[in-house]
Every structure is written in C-alpha cells, then in structure tokens.
Amino acid sequence: MGILRVALGCAVGAMWIVTAGAAELPLDAADFGAVGDGKADDTAAVQAALNDAADGPQVVLLRPGAYRITAMLDVPRGVTLSGMMPRWEDGSTTIVVEQPGFSAVCLNHVSNVRALSFSYPNNQDTDNPQEYPPTILLRGINPSVEQVRFDCAWIGIAPPPEGANTGQSLFRDITGFTHKVGLRLDGIKDIARIEDVHWFVGGTGGGTFYRRERVGFELGAVDGVIMSRCFLIGGKTFLHQLAKNGAGENVHSLGLHITQCWTEAVKYGFLIEGICGLVLSDTQIYVSDPEGAGIAMRMPQLYYHSTISNTQVRCDGSHAVGIDYSPTDDHARNHLMVNQCEVFESSTAVHLGPGARRVWITGNHLQSYGDGIRVDEGATEFFLKDNFIRAVTPINDASGDAAKKVIADNLTP
C-alpha cells in the first residue's frame, strides 16, 4: 500500500502499525467500499477484503455498523472475519440478512469469525418463523466461532446437511436466539470444544415454535465433544445426539464430556439416541413437559461407559421421568454409573429398561410421585445402593429372580 497505517480498537484490543511496503494487518473492509449503514449492499466489498486477506494479513476488520449482505461471505482458508472490541452480547458490528436463501458466512479450513452479531430483521416471529440456511456454515477443519451473537437465526452454526469434518473446532462465548437449532455438528473426525454458549429467548410472539421444536446442540457423528458452561432456556432439547447422521447412517461417537451446564423449560435435557457414551457432571436440568425426561439414553448401545454425577433434574410441575436408561442392544461396553445426583418431583426418578446391563445407581437423592427406581424385566447386573428415596414405590423391581443384582442400604422414609 506504501503508506503508514494505524488501526485502533481491533478485534483483539491491540494496535497494528504497518510501515511502507509491508502488508497491512488487519485489512479494513471500509477500504474496499464497505459502508456499514444497514442500507447499502456490502456483500461485494466485504468479500473483496476477504479474498485479499487470503494472500496477506489473513484478518479482515469490520468497523462498528450494520453490514447488509445479499449473498454468502466465503471466508478463505486461514482468514478471520472480525468485528471490533469483542464483548458478551456485543451488537456493535452486525451482519444483516434480510432474506432467506443463503448462509451468511462459510468457514473453510482454519478460518474464523469473531466479535460479530448476525441479525434477521424479517424473521422475528417466534410462532411462524421462516426457514433459512445456517447462519455460519462449517466446511473445513479447525474453524472457530468466538464472541458471536445471533438475533432470530433459523440455525446458528452447522455443516451442510450431509455433514462435514470440522474437527479441532472451537465454539466459545456465543449467545443470542435461534428458532430451530443453535449449534449442529456432524461428521467430525476429532474433538470439538464448546464453551460458554448460551441460547436465550427472543423475537416477537408467544414462542410457540421454538418452545416446541428448538434444540440447543444437535450432534450427528462426532468423534468427541468437550462442552462446559453452556445454557438453554426454552425448547425441545438442550442436547440431542441423533440416531442417524446426515447421510442416513447409524451414528457412532466415542463420547460426549459435558460439565457445568444449565437448561430450563425443555422436554428433554439430554436425548441420546446414537451409539455413544455420556460423561455428564455438575449440571442443572429443568424439565417442563410431562412426556419428557431430564436425561433419556435410548441408544442401541453405549460406546464406552457413561457416568452421570452431581447433577440435578427438576421436574416440578411436569412430573416427567428423571433419568431413563433404555439401551436396545447388549454390548460389553455398556456400563452406566449414576451417583450423587438429585431428581425432584418426577413420575419415575430413575428407569432401567429391559436392556440395562452393568448399572450402578448409588448415593443419590430421589423424590418421585410414582416409582423412585423402576427396573424392567430383562435388566440385569445392577447395583441399587445407598440412595435416599422418597416415593410412593421406592423401588419397583420387575427384573425377576434370575437377574444378577444387589439392592441394599437404601433409605426410604
């Protein structure tokens, strides 16, 4: 460029000074004609900056403003598209999508978006929302989405319908409102990290659609997920592990490791239907639908063991099932431990289905208007010990005399 340039207040809160003849860092989309007034079509200008950044600084900065786009922004390999001064629920730099038909941003290998808000001003009706493509489309390995806010997106972040290997991905400090799905992952051949992602209510209307249909985190085939400090209020399910991936194949995942999450007013806290393990701890679940469950593990079998600990399921008002473990196939890996949990005001606090094998239910506080622990015929190899159970029927065991089991030292006032 041959000039001295200073960029202040950039996405990482630093200052870049670039001398004559050196590549600028970052590129300013305004230098390519981006206006940011919410009226001009800024698609071509922002895309030109992204294309130019692929050969140089690999960072494009959007100054505070509203950038209306009419086609997808394709972020090249290794490039970051960033707003300024990221902070929680920051709307100072907004990308506006007025019409359906395209994703706002596509992330390729090692490309990133951060410090941006995505707004859908014509999709605010929470009773009859329009179906849009995912706001952020994932196509490459090692993408990251950080300090991003959504305003009435249909789906926040997702790969194409057939899935994509977006392993080694990072999703952090994300918030806002989506109608259908917050974050969807499918096809990952490595670990994804999900940290401090919070899905709230929003829009206009009574919320009849999202309260009935919304899924906070939807997973197809993923090698593994490490999730912490995430939140959802209002929807069908906080986390749904699907039985089939986007290609229609049975889902096999190594496991989901989840801690310190919170969900309210859902039918299911966790619905696990694919072959995977679940390690869940220190989490709060509030179920508001009597047909639902706090944790429903209805997979063919586990893929490595599962542990649920230090977790509370509240069913007050709904009397839903607390924890439902009903695998359909036996496998040597099937192994569930539930300990130091509380289930409150349930219809059945813990249910072990006919395929349950190698199960430890120990040291829990279980309160139910029906069965405290219900065991179906066919379940075997289980321990029910040292629980405090307040229920009409503390232990309803239909497993029969042939089942291998230990039931001992439970307090049932």
Image (cartoon, rainbow, N blue to C red):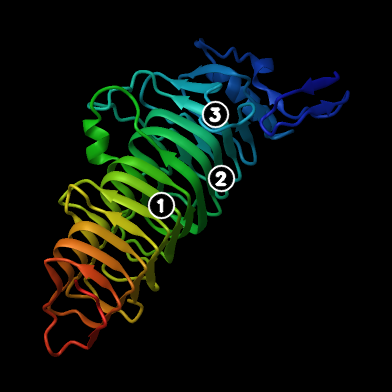
Compute the Cα span from label 2 to label 3.
15 Å
Q: Residues within 10 Å of mark 1 (few under 14, many from 20)?
A: many
Q: Which residue is mark 1?
A: 186
Label 1 sits on a secondary structure element that is loop
Q: Is residue 88 left or right of residue 267?
A: right
Q: Residues within 10 Å of mark 2 (few under 14, many from 20)?
A: many
**Which residue is painted at 20% across and 52% down in the image?**
292
Compute the Cα span from label 3 to label 1.
24 Å
Where's residue 343, x and y in %?
A: 27, 60
Check residue 279 in the rendering and tell me which mark sits there, or answer none. Answer: none
Label 2 sits on a secondary structure element that is loop
Q: Nearer the viewer, residue 406 or 50?
A: 406
Q: Nearer the viewer, mark 3 or mark 1?
A: 3
Q: Is residue 52 visible?
A: yes
Q: Is residue 294 left or right of residue 137?
A: left
Amino acid at circle 2? Pro
Q: Earlier in the sequence, mark 3 or mark 1?
A: 3
Q: Nearer the viewer, residue 184 or 412?
A: 412
Q: Which residue is mark 3?
A: 116
Amino acid at circle 3? Leu
Q: Which residue is mark 2?
A: 143
The answer to whether marks 1 and 2 mark residues whose Cβ atoms lie closer than 8 Å is no
Which residue of the protein is positioned furthest toward the right in this rendering?
Answer: 20
Q: Earlier in the sequence, mark 1 or mark 2?
A: 2
Q: Residues within 10 Å of mark 3 (few under 14, many from 20)?
A: many
**Which residue is painted at 60% across and 15% down in the image?**
34
**Which residue is painted at 44% across and 47% down in the image?**
230
Screen quadrant of the C terminus: bottom left
